[in-house]
Amino acid sequence: MQRVRHALPIVSFSGGTFNKMKTARTLTKKPIVWLFCFLIVCQICITTADADVLFSFTITGTAGANVISTNLFPNIGYKTSPLHSQPLQFTLFDLPLTTNDVGTTRTETSATSTNFNGFSALLTDGLGSPEKITFATLPAPDQFGGLSLAEGVVTGHSPDLFGYRIDSINLTLSSLSFSTPGSDPNHDGIWTDSSYSYTLFAIGT
């Protein structure tokens, strides 16, 4: 059974410093430089306004499977029925991650995944329940189990991201380790336990 511990959505912002005195003297003496800097600032403002982090959700947990594996499959999809037997819909991040991927970010868009548009449509349809985002994260491919959470829990918006446009959904892997045969519940040596932490976040407007 997969055991997952989740955290409340976290969104972080970063900024910088601006030397007003030095810049003011430069702009006063050189009007052309002032115009050039003004255009740069405007361009930065426009670029920043075009996209933003819509949500950021970190999930940390352990999972085991009766395989010998050095791969972790995030398998993040949707369930629209309370039936546990319903397979995931519009699954993203179904390709394996390894320990070499720690510290990297994978990105899903309409150009990289045929499931992206369907996933994004459910995440912005304003319906909420019974739609749930499901994390079927295991050291083996899986489309049925996992932890199902309400869209509002993952995104911090109620009921979902209705009214927003999602440009990309991203996954940053923070930590990953494997143990074989680990807990070996079947006592046959064929088992892998995994421990992981990753952050799921969306970019859009």
Image: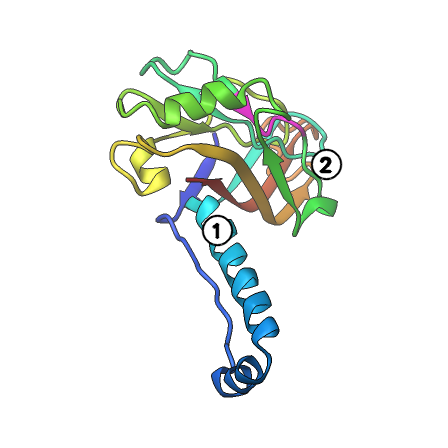
Mark 1, residue position? 46
Q: Horizontal and vertical percent for residue 7? A: 38, 49
* Label 2: which secondary element: loop
The residue at the point 56 percent across, 21 percent down is 142
The residue at the point 68 percent across, 31 percent down is 96
* Label 1: which secondary element: helix
Q: Compared with residue 12, is residue 63 higher up or lower down, i.e. above or below?
A: above
Splitting the image into 4 quarters, where does residue 94 fall? top right
Q: Horizontal and vertical percent for residue 69? A: 71, 32
The residue at the point 54 percent across, 45 percent down is 198
Q: Residues within 10 Å of mark 1 (few under 14, many from 20)?
A: few
Q: Compared with residue 47, is residue 76 higher up or lower down, i.e. above or below?
A: above
As for residue 73 lying within the magenta part, the answer is no
Splitting the image into 4 quarters, where does residue 178 fall? top right
Bounds of the magenta span?
A: 91-95
Depth order, front residue of 192/10? 10
Q: Horizontal and vertical percent for residue 195? A: 58, 44
Q: Is residue 145 visible?
A: no
122 displayed left or right of 176: left
Q: Is residue 73 visible?
A: yes
Q: Which mark is residue 70?
A: 2
Colouring of the image: rainbow
Placement of the C terminus among the 4 image quadrants: top left
